[in-house]
Amino acid sequence: RRGGIERIARDLYIVPSRTRQRVEYFVDLERQSCECRDHRRTGGACMHVYAAMLYQAWLRRSARVVATSGAFDASEGRS
């Protein structure tokens, strides 16, 4: 969980409101939809969708770094 964003399924995230305490929105990146007022009003991507997209990119980049760092190299320690 980074910035309060939580991934709950492949393309489904919970993103907290930045202006209202204890308010969270469900964001579906596959549909690029959000429960917030701005998304319902405009039909376009809102700040919560963009935040989930950035978080998804961060997760993917982090996974690549771990995979390429050799941190889980099963061959280490074998003679």
Image (spheres, helix red, strand yellow):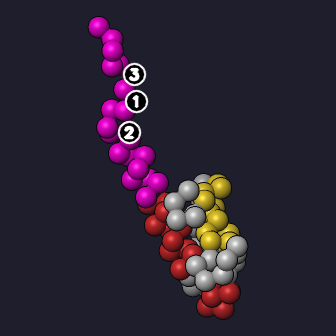
Q: Residues within 10 Å of mark 1 (few under 14, many from 20)?
A: few
Residue 51 location (% of width, % of height): 51, 71
Spatial distance from mark 1 to mark 3, Cα to Cα?
6 Å
> Which residue is identified by label 1?
72
Q: Which residues are magenta?
A: 58-79
> Which sits earlier in the primary sequence, circle 1 or circle 2?
2
Residue 62 location (% of width, % of height): 41, 50
Amino acid residing under circle 2? Ala
Name the residue at 58% across, 64% down.
4
Farthest residue, direction top? 79
Residue 32 location (% of width, % of height): 58, 73
Spatial distance from mark 3 to mark 2, Cα to Cα?
12 Å
Using the rendered image of the protein, determine whether residue 23 is visible from the camera's viewpoint: yes
Amino acid residing under circle 3? Ala
Work out whether residue 23 or residue 36 is closer to the camera in this orientation and state it: 23
Q: Are marks 3 and 2 in contact (CB under 8 Å)?
A: no
**In this image, 6 relative to 61: left or right?**
right
Q: Is residue 6 above or below residue 77?
A: below
Mark 1 secondary-structure assignment: loop
Q: Are marks 1 and 2 in contact (CB under 8 Å)?
A: yes
The N terminus is located in which quarter? bottom right
The C terminus is located in which quarter? top left
Q: Residues within 10 Å of mark 3 (few under 14, many from 20)?
A: few
Using the rendered image of the protein, determine whether residue 28 is visible from the camera's viewpoint: no
Work out whether residue 50 or residue 6 is closer to the camera in this orientation and state it: 6
Magenta stretch: residue 56 in it? no
> Which residue is identified by label 2?
67
Magenta stretch: residue 61 in it? yes
Name the residue at 70% across, 75% down.
23
Residue 74 marker: 3
**In this image, 37 relative to 76: left or right?**
right
Mark 2 secondary-structure assignment: helix
